[in-house]
Amino acid sequence: MPRQVLDESSLHPAIRDTVANLNADIVHNVQAAAASNPVLVVGMAFNSPGRAARKALATAGIPFHYLQYGSYLGQWRRRNALKMWTGWPTFPMIFVKGQLIGGERDLRKLIESGELKRLLGQ
């Protein structure tokens, strides 16, 4: 399922480096955390779905790592790099064994069906 991304040949050479590296650090942080934690929740302050996802994981007894980037009013430009990288439009973003599984509703479905524990090999 390829999604539309502007081809590099359509970028003027003078801006290619800016496009390639804008807020790359936040993407690298999430990539590293997703690779080293079986369950990763990426969220922001005051985000009720993010809070609900963490609560659902805790209730299910599933350990997770949490990364928080700003709030509704802060760091939205930096968080936008994550949205562009993943193609996922909202927070939280939840990764299981390095794979983006979606947000809080998607997580609940996996917990309720038992699939999350299967994915984790439990």
Image: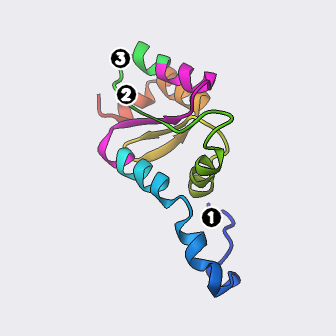
| Residue 21 belongs to the span the image colors magenta | no
First in residue order: circle 1 vs circle 2: 1
Q: Which of 45 and 50 lies nearest the eye of the viewer? A: 45
Circles 1, 2 touching at the beta carbon (< 8 Å): no
Q: State the image coordinates of residue 76 (x, y, percent, origin top left).
A: 65, 44
Rendered residue at 62%/80% (across/down): 8
Q: Which residues are magenta?
A: 34-54
Left or right: residue 71 versus residue 31 is: right
Q: Which mark is residue 83?
A: none
Rendered residue at 43%/21% (across/down): 57
Q: State the image coordinates of residue 70 (x, y, percent, origin top left).
A: 57, 36
View extreme (top): residue = 59
Rendered residue at 68%/84% (across/down): 12
User: Can you identify the residue that label 2 sits on?
Assistant: 117
User: Can you identify the residue that label 1 sits on?
Assistant: 2
Separation of marks 1 and 3 at Cα, in angstroms: 35 Å
- Tell me the kind of residue under disc 1: Pro
First in residue order: circle 1 vs circle 3: 1
From the image, which quarter does the N terminus lie in? bottom right
Q: Does residue 1 lie above or below 99 as drawn?
A: below
- Tell me the kind of residue under disc 3: Gly
From the image, which quarter does the C terminus lie in? top left
User: Can you identify the residue that label 3 sits on?
Assistant: 61
- Tell me the kind of residue under disc 2: Lys
Colour scheme employed for the rendering of this structure: rainbow
Nearer to us of marks 1 and 3 is: 3
First in residue order: circle 2 vs circle 3: 3
Left or right: residue 105 versus residue 65 is: right
Q: State the image coordinates of residue 53 (x, y, percent, origin top left).
A: 52, 24
Left or right: residue 64 versus residue 106 is: left
